[in-house]
Image (tube, rainbow, N blue to C red):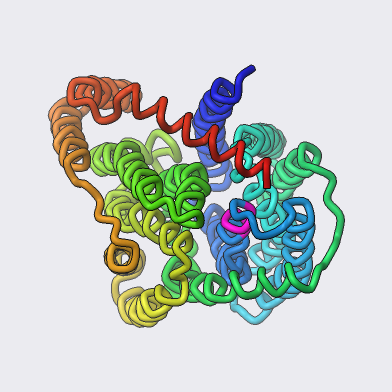
Amino acid sequence: MSQTKQIAHNTFAQIAGKAISTILGLVAIAIMTRSLGVEQFGWYATAIGFLQFIGILSDFGFTVTSAKMLSEPAFDKKKLLNNLFTWRFVTTIIFQGIGPLTILLFPYPPQIKLAVAILSISYISASLNQIFIAFYQTRLQTHIQAIAEVISRMVLVTGIALMSVGHLGFLPIMGAVALAAFFNTGYLWWKSEPIRLQTNKDITFAILKKIWPTALAVIFNCIYLQGDRFILPLFVSQTDVGFYGAAYRVLDIAIQVAAMIMGIMMPLITFGWSRNLKPEFEKQCQRSFDLMSLLLIPMIAGIFVLAVPLMNFIAGENFAISGNILRILIISVIGVSFGMVFGHMALSIDRQKNALWIYITDAILSLAGYLIFIPRYGIYGAAYVTIFSELYAGFFLAWLVIHYSGFRPQLFTLFKILISSLVMALVVYWLQPLNIILSIFVGTFIYAILAIVLRFFSPQTLKEIFSSNKNKIAENRQN
């Protein structure tokens, strides 16, 4: 198989894998919500929110930093991979091992504290996955990541289904969630090059130099990204946490799509900037901007219209309130998506330090907002502060990249996407009440037709993407 065909195959495999894993993830949520009910799903959301807060707090930006460094020609790739894995392993054991113990300081029911203990194992696995994911991203072998995720989701659905059929209760279901994470890490490790614990003074110094601004940014990111799910259980009932958590599990799908896009595009952006190929850099930045718009804007429009029937379909009628929350939260994806695009660009052009003021001020404002509005307005206060925090970060990160790189996104494709998404949303809204599956099918069909007619992306653009990827692989192998 030629390199170009192999890249096309890998890209298709990743997209297909993400689609399958998303469906399986929704199936898992559907089983859990119906098996646990609103309050016990709130227990799960509280435990997950607590661990995600610790996980992001101790993330240090290893995935994006690893992808960037593995795309650069400075060090031997094998030694660099070993060093990155070693330091991720050390930080994971220290922070993910000790951090979950702090749950004992909070006034939560014993079931939540036990769930944190069980689920913390899965977050250790997820932390180690970061290095493998970065490695596969730089080699454009992200199909391996997709396969691992599908395997993990299959184990998740099977495990949760068995626990639910057996009426084994809350904690065994948490055990099934933790078990699925092991299969993900196991497959990624099995398919990678042999990795051993290794440190090198020069490489370690380079890692620390690259990672500290990102690590500091991630710490403040954690406050505005996870602050709502961390603070909310302290002020509202577990039932309300369940409603909010169910909506957020659906929202996470859009966030994962954004992360997938930038996982594909960031090595190409870094490749152009690190080699002073400004036209190539700007081309890949524009493609990232357009691709993010192409996939997420219609998703935002569709979910906004169908939020309530969508949550009824996924989680059951007991979670109808989650639909109202989802309709608010989905607006924040505008900030999430463009914040992710321009945040990755800022990292690619080594402007992490310049971006720190954005994350710090966002964290301060968001934390103040959560503490003021959650006690007064509960889950709705949390949702609106989340919208503010994401839009704030997205706007100022865009300004930062435009200021320092000179890249200015062309907005014509974005305009066509906005018009098409609006038309799609209006038609779907007009057809209500219609079966949710038919509504999604009609909306997708309308948007696809408009995309073809208005030529969002031409076949030539796809060929150029494959060509760029092929050249990048060739040079990385030479280095």
Q: Position of residue 72 (x, y in %)?
A: 60, 55
Q: Is residue 314 left or right of residue 307?
A: right
Residue 17 higher or lower than 398, as above or below: above
Q: For the point 71% across and 37% down, which residue is it?
A: 159
**Is there any visible trace of residue 3 in the rendered image?**
yes
The quadrant of the picture occupied by the N terminus is top right
Q: Position of residue 407 (x, y in %)?
A: 29, 56
Question: Quick check: is 228 in the magenta stretch?
Answer: no
Which one is in front, 8 or 311? 8
**Above/below status of 50 relative to 465:** below
User: Residue 375: in sight, yes or no?
Assistant: no
**Most foreground residue, 117 or 444:** 444
Q: Nearer the viewer, residue 201 or 302?
A: 201
Q: Residue at x 46, y 44 (%)?
A: 265
Position of residue 198 measured from the top left corner of the image (x, y, whole percent): 85, 63
List x then y, in percent, for residue 28. Answer: 57, 38
Q: Which residues are magenta?
A: 66-70
Examine the image and state in which quarter residue 455 appears. Answer: top left
